[in-house]
Amino acid sequence: MIRQFGERAPHLVLTGGNPLKRPDLFDLIEHGAKLGLRMSVAPSATERLTREVLRSMKAAGVESISLSLDGCTAQRHDDFRGVSGCFNWTVQAAHAARSEGLQLQVNTLVTTQTESDLPGLYDVVSGLDPMRWSLFFLISVGRGRALKPVSPERSEALLNWLYDLSVNTPFAIATTEAPHFRRVVTGRMRAEGIPMARIRTTPVGRGFGIRDGNGIM
């Protein structure tokens, strides 16, 4: 049924939890790839995410993976995630994925606990050769209620900082649950004399509009 959406074929992301805990994961990947779907996986960074597993994902039809990184050092990331060793597993998996020819997206949660670490995180992410750094601004629901979102003023400053980075960075920078990034980017680019038609062709502008009930299911 997903394939009936037409051309260009939908991009299917298998996520969780940890999709590696599904015994039929590789069957699902192979089936989706045979249907012509663009397949991605968002695995958890554990000891199970080895180079051999990533190689098998690539062989089954996976185009890209996403990994979460919320601290620029092992102590900061592991303390935030509550799992010792998680930082090293994440970095090792990122390098292995790229060496196996998989595209990489790095996800970072933006909260009052992580915001001061974002410049250091940018440096770490830059060394992983990703296609995209996606920053998820906290929505305080579920377990997220134990965390604190950044203030409106701090959010505005961070979005302007992200735009400054996006001008020269070799990978795309995107936000989730921060649609006001579009306002910041559009305002900054138009002030620089860039027309709206060209804004939508830039790496940061190409993501505009796809999370407003237009393209995400």
Image (cartoon, helix red, strand yellow):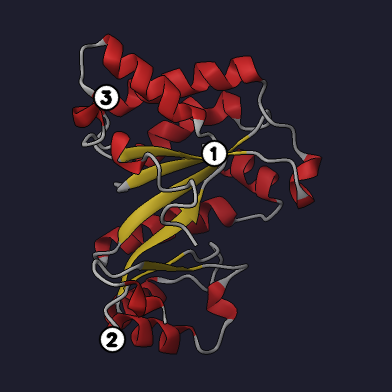
Identified by mark 3, the residue type is: Val
Q: Are marks 1 and 3 in contact (CB under 8 Å)?
A: no
Return the residue found at the far right.
146
Question: How many residues crowd around disc 3 within 10 Å: few (fewer than 14), some, or many (20 or more)?
Answer: some
Q: Can residue 128 be seen in this view?
A: no
The answer to whether the residues at label 2 and label 3 have Cβ atoms under 8 Å apart is: no
Q: Mark 1 points at which residue?
A: 73
State the separation of the CA atoms marked 1 and 3. Answer: 26 Å
Left-right relation of 115 to 95 = right
Above or below, 168 against 138 in this view is above
Q: Picture coordinates of residue 125 (x, y %)?
A: 39, 40
Real-space CA distance between mark 2 and mark 3, rounded to the nearest whole angstrom: 38 Å
The residue singled out by tag 2 in the image is 34
Question: Which residue in the structure is indicated by mark 3?
Answer: 167
Mark 1: few, some, or many residues within 10 Å (few <14, many ≥20)?
A: some
Q: Judging from the image, what secondary structure is the residue with disc 1 in?
A: loop
Q: Give the spatial CA distance, label 1 vs label 2.
A: 40 Å
Residue shown at 26% from the left, 79% from the top: 36
Q: Nearer the viewer, residue 73 or 37?
A: 37
Q: What residue type is labelled 1?
A: Thr
Image coordinates of residue 56 in percent, x first then y, are 34, 80
Q: Is residue 141 left or right of residue 198?
A: right
> Looking at the image, do the residues carrying marks 1 and 2 touch, with CB atoms under 8 Å apart?
no
Q: What element carries label 3?
A: helix
Q: Quadrant of the N terminus?
A: bottom left
Residue 121, percent from left and from top? 47, 34
